[in-house]
């Protein structure tokens, strides 16, 4: 039997041991590579710099059981900022360190010269192992770790692992920094776009109004709502005077004499902090004014906006001052437009008043005319742009009697139209119970006198048309005398009556009764006919009207009215109509 070789057995044991060590080393390397791969995936899964920094610390610290860790972000030159940390006081975040002479390679705390005073900060918190985060000779940050929880020293393999983590993190941190910068740029752009949109919307709102109060109110909303300014004052220069246009929060604040001119000499926004001493700066500081914004137009400061602090206590940035400056200039331009068009606004209000008066006037005039056989009645009213108080009416008393009237109220616009409505109301109320027309006119005179001032009066002509007896009983109260037109074309003015209505109370009026024969007519008109002027300033006058009536007396009342209106229009030509034109004709049919 052959005995075994002892040397051979020892050789086999050493080979087995070596294979085991190699296997363990491969397994460790595999685990490290796997861990590095996982960390790389985590770091590359986000562009958020905070998330990346947290992963840089958490993953290796958890794997190696490290108690403290800190990441500092490079902020330019030798300055580093504490960006995130684990196991250290949170109030350290944001602290900045000046770290000249920082190595580009991993180092231990004892390797740094005592002359580098920045190391005192790290020694204070027992941070021992450091890994600069570099990429292509650019430093992006610094990772520092404290001691291990088990108190053991770092193995060389662990230092290599942490170094690999810092190398992997470099590109992720660079991406995160670029992403943050782009995000900040986008935020600034978004803010600028929002400010531009706000200014555009505000500009539309300011331009849409020519009311200075509304402009100032809109400006107030923007100052308090958009800029969060809780108190402000607006001074405006109009002509040579400086006016306080608006004041919110500055109680009893008045600008000292002499400072107002200094304020209006400012052409660009000014922050009141650190202004050189002067009477103006002392006043602004005592009043707690934080910013002075000139409101300019045509290269001149025509307004001043003084602002207090903001609700959020944030200082005004350059962008804020630019926004306020642009806003103030827009508001100033709108205010000037409002002042420029004040006269136009006043004219527009007057036109609206005149339109209302015209509608009142039209509403009081008859829309149609009754059939009063054997009489035919027709009237026409042509309103001027300056609404007067012309009035005519045909009012039924009973089957046989009708009131036919024409009047001209003094003045123009709404007051004249309202006075006209008072006259109509009197006629409607009193006609049904009137025993005689002269007494009816006397009662209306007292009503007008009691309800108007001495500067308001009415010229009036009217009468009761009795179709059964074929008579017309009239009273002329200071009106242009109408004409009785015979069948042959002769004219007779109808003047019996008395004073205009509303001048003297308890006035007695005289009436007269006409018996109208076949073909005879009564033509009534207001002074808008006889006083119509052409471009040369000539009046139409009574003689021209009388001639027209004589030549056309055989026509129907409608045709006579239309002929008179057309004749006046042709005479005036392009000259503006200064008063209403009203014509009423009644005629006994053949």
Image: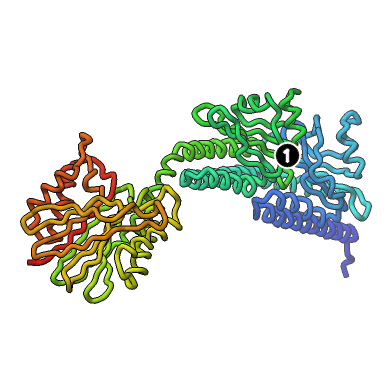
Instruction: Quadrant for the N terminus, please.
Output: bottom right
Q: In this view, does 378 lie above or below 390?
A: below
Residue 283, percent across and down? 74, 30
Q: In this view, does 139 lie above or below 69?
A: above
Q: 423 or 274: which is nearer to us?
A: 423
Residue 404, percent across and down? 25, 64
**Disc 1 target residue:** 252
Q: Which residue lies furthest to the bottom in this view?
A: 399
Q: 402 or 291: which is nearer to us?
A: 402
Q: Which residue lies furthest to the right in this view?
A: 151
Instruction: Quadrant for the C terminus, please.
Output: bottom left
- Colouring of the image: rainbow
Q: Quadrant of residue 462?
A: bottom left
Residue 30, percent across and down? 74, 57
How many callouts does the rendering have? 1
Image point 58% across, 47% down: which residue?
217
Q: What element carries label 1?
A: loop
Q: 95 or 120: which is nearer to us?
A: 95
Direction from residue 398 to residue 18 in the image, left or right: right
Direction from residue 351 to residue 516 in the image, left or right: left
Q: Quadrant of residue 429?
A: bottom left
Image point 63% across, 31% down: which residue?
269
Image point 62% across, 47% down: which residue?
226
Residue 427 at least partly seen? yes
Q: 80 or 540: which is nearer to us?
A: 540
Residue 362, percent across and down? 31, 59
Label 1 neighbour load within 10 Å: few <14, some 14-19, many 20+: few
Residue 193 at least partly seen? no
């Amino acid at each position: 039997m052959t005995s075994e070789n002892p040397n051979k057995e020892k050789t086999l044991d050493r080979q087995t041991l070596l294979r085991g060590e190699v296997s363990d080393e491969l397994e460790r390397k595999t685990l490290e590579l796997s861990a590095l791969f996982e960390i790389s995936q985590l770091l590359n899964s986000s562009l958020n710099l905070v998330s990346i920094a947290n992963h840089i610390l958490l993953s290796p610290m958890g794997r190696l059981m490290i108690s403290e860790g800190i990441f500092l972000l490079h902020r330019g030159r030798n300055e580093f900022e504490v960006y995130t940390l684990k196991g250290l006081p949170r109030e350290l975040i944001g602290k900045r360190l000046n770290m000249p002479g920082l190595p580009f390679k991993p180092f231990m705390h004892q390797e740094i010269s005592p002359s580098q005073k920045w190391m005192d900060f790290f020694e204070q918190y027992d941070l021992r192992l450091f890994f600069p985060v570099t990429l292509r000779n650019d430093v992006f940050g610094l990772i520092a770790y404290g001691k291990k929880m088990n108190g053991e020293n770092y193995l060389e393999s662990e230092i290599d692992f942490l170094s690999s983590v810092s190398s992997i993190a470099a590109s992720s941190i660079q991406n995160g920094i670029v992403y943050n910068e782009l995000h900040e740029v986008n935020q600034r752009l978004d803010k600028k776009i929002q400010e531009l949109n706000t200014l555009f919307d505000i500009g539309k709102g300011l331009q849409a109004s020519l009311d200075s109060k509304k402009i100032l109110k809109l400006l107030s909303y923007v100052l308090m709502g958009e800029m969060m300014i809780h108190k402000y004052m607006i001074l405006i220069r109009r002509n040579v005077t400086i006016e306080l246009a608006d004041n919110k929060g500055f109680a009893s604040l008045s600008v000292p004499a002499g400072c107002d001119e200094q304020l209006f000499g400012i052409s660009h926004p000014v922050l009141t902090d650190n202004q050189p001493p002067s009477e103006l700066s002392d006043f602004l500081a005592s009043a707690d004014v934080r910013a002075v914004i000139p409101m300019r137009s045509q290269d001149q400061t025509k307004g001043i906006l003084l602002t207090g602090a903001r609700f959020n206590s944030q200082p005004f940035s350059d962008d804020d001052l630019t926004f306020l400056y642009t806003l103030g200039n827009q508001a100033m331009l709108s205010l000037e437009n409002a002042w420029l068009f004040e006269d136009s606004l006043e004219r527009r209000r007057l036109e609206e008043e005149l339109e209302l008066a015209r509608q009142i006037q039209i509403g009081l005039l008859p829309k149609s005319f009754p059939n009063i056989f054997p009489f035919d009645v027709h009237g026409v009213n042509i309103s001027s742009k300056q609404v007067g108080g012309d009035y005519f009416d045909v009012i039924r008393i009973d089957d046989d009697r009708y009131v036919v009237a024409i009047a001209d109220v003094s003045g123009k616009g709404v007051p004249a139209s309202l006075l006209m409505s008072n006259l109509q109301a009197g006629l409607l109320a009193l006609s049904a119970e009137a025993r005689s027309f002269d007494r009816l006119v006397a009662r209306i005179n007292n009503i007008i006198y009691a309800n108007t001032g001495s500067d308001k009066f009415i010229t009036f002509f009217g009468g009761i048309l009795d179709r059964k007896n074929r008579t017309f009983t009239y009273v002329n109260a200071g009106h242009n005398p109408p004409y009785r037109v015979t069948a042959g074309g002769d004219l007779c003015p109808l003047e019996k009556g008395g004073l205009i209505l509303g001048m003297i109370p308890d006035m007695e009026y005289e009436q007269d009764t006409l018996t109208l024969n076949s073909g005879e007519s009564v033509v009534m008109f207001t002074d808008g006919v006889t006083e119509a002027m052409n471009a040369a300033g000539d009046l139409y006058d009574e003689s021209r009207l009388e001639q027209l009536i004589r030549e056309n007396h055989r026509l129907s009342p409608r045709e006579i009215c239309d002929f008179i209106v057309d004749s006046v229009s042709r005479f005036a030509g392009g000259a503006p109509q200064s008063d209403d034109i009203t014509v009423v004709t009644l005629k006994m049919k053949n």
